[in-house]
Amino acid sequence: MASKAWPYEEARKLLKRWPEGKPAGGPVIFETGYGPSGLPHIGTFNEVARTSFVRHAYEELTGGTATRLIAFSDDMDGLRKVPDNVPNQAMLEENLGKPLTQIPDPFGEYPSFAQHNNAMLCRFLDRYGFDYEFLSATDCYTSGRFDDVIRKVLHGFDAIMGVMLPTLREDRRKTYSPVLPISPTSGRVLQVPVEVIDAEAGLIAFDDEDGSRVQQSAFGGSAKLQWKVDWAARWVALGVDYEMAGKDLIDSVIQSGKIARILGGRPPEGFNYEMFLDEKGEKISKSKGNGLSLEEWLRYGSEPSLAFYIYREPKRAKSLHIGVIPRAVDEYLQFRGNYPKQAVEQKLGNPVHHIHRGTVPEQSLPLTYGLLLNLVSLPGLQDKEVAWRFVQRYAPGTSPESDPELDELIGLAVNYARDFVVPGLQRRAPSEEEAAALRELDSELAKLPPDASAEDIQTQVFEVGKKHYGKENLRAWFQALYETLLGSSQGPRMGSFIALYGIDNCRKLIAEALQTET
């Protein structure tokens, strides 16, 4: 109740919403929406994961009050644009404007494009163990489940228009309608003015694409609601208590909230998270292709590291690109390592408590991702089996079979080094002053036993650095080591690296560097 961790702050909103619990002991409903006009992506994971953090926090606060998470697919939307990353573009072009569930699957695997993408969404969510209930907009409309709320929309038609029209451009006002009829001739979702003939019976009138005047029911899937109205109607029809949205939808949340009240409902609790940025500081956009896919993250970083990264500071814009992955992995492991030693209030504020639903893995890893990355960036080490030989000498008793998480980490580091680090490495020649320090370091390393500890090696590295650079300038010493031995401007704790790579191997690196002395 006192924790400042944001999931608990969000969960306490729900305690205020239902101080005595929902009527008749009904479950608290969390929702996240998905537009299946494209394939699931990292933003989908982001929203479902963050909503799940709040859901778990609420269950903790209430001692296990019943909850449900609805993953809602807006699959009755008309296809507005052909996605760039799917086959059979010409076929999709011919079906623009039709509900996604009425468009053939361009991949030829499912009865419709929407069903293909919905199946991908469910596999995507199942892969990460999310507990959710999938709902299809098409099923909700065609089954009559939304008929009652559509009736409320028709009764409140003028009031809804009063909310929406001031927010629209002049040309859009002329065609705007809260209700979008499905053309009986073309099957397309029509953006046309609609006249309410009989709200109670659900009867509407409109001009079809061929100019003919049509009267038909708005019930049973013969029409759908405009999206901001649809959002509000969904909240009311499904009894949604919590839904978050991106900062770009703040105005939409306000308008949908007003419409929900017109429909006799209560807008859900929630908050608006900030958007992710690319390495240039620009907003990530699917159409620009400047984002980072889930598959890309998981080629170089673990799944918990992604959950950890999106957990932190959701109201601050953050970069989301390949370069953030190594640090995210190591910070996740660091926070996880701290968890067992922390007091309860610290544990509740630790991101790993939330991403692991209170059951945090206890095992620790003997190596950091950063240290492994420096190892496997060296010539000839972009191989998992070769890397394991060094790791087993550094951490005896480990193996791919007994330490699957460490095995995964080595593989991820190899992928990252091969794709991004090795191509850009360029070891520079040491200066005369640097060469003198390297010679002394080589001499001191030669005195150490092959199995010297990382701490003993680090002590010698420090002593040589203090002698040649002074205590106040040790940073320059370590930078010289990184640039002349590893070809990078930054690097690991040298004692740990030398212990991992081996004293003799590191002496060979020094010898190679001295051969290029300027």
Image (cartoon, helix red, strand yellow):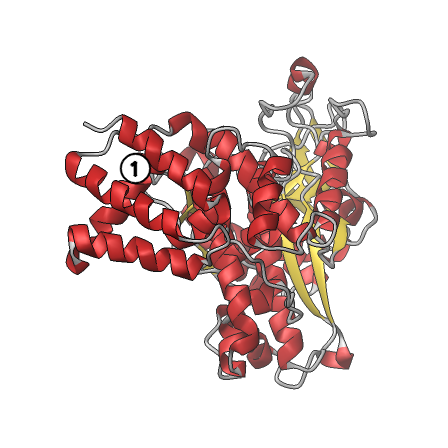
Residue 64, given in percent of the width and then of the height, sits at: 72, 78
Please determine whether, in this image, residue 380 is positioned above or below residue 398: above
Q: Which residue is drawn at 70% across and 61% down?
A: 69
Does 304 sit left or right of 368 as displayed?
right
Quick one: 240 or 283, which is closer to the camera? Answer: 283
Q: Which quarter of the figure has residue 212?
A: top right
Does 381 sit left or right of 115 as displayed?
left
Can residue 499 be seen by looking at this rendering?
yes
Quick one: 154 or 61, which is closer to the camera? Answer: 61
Q: Residue at x 47, y 29 (%)?
A: 379
Which image quarter holds the C terminus?
Answer: top left
> Which residue is the extreme one toward the bottom?
20
Residue 224, given in percent of the width and then of the height, sits at: 69, 42
Q: Which quarter of the figure has residue 102?
A: top right
Does 302 sit left or right of 253 as displayed?
right
Residue 18, given in percent of the width and then of the height, sits at: 62, 80
In the structure shown, which secondary structural element does the residue marked by tag 1 occupy? helix
Mark 1 residue type: Glu
Residue 449, given in percent of the width and then of the height, sits at: 46, 53
Does 508 sit left or right of 405 as displayed?
left
Can residue 156 be seen by looking at this rendering?
no
Quick one: 6 or 142, which is closer to the camera? Answer: 6
Please determine whether, in this image, residue 144 is positioned above or below residue 188: below
Quick one: 479 or 130, which is closer to the camera? Answer: 479
Q: Which residue is drawn at 69% across and 28% down?
A: 98
> Which residue is the extreme one toward the top?
90
Q: Which residue carries the number 1 mark?
A: 483
Q: Residue at x 73, y 22 (%)?
A: 106
Q: How crowded is mark 1: few (under 14 residues within 10 Å), some or many (20 or more)?
A: many
Please determine whether, in this image, residue 55 is positioned above or below residue 84: below
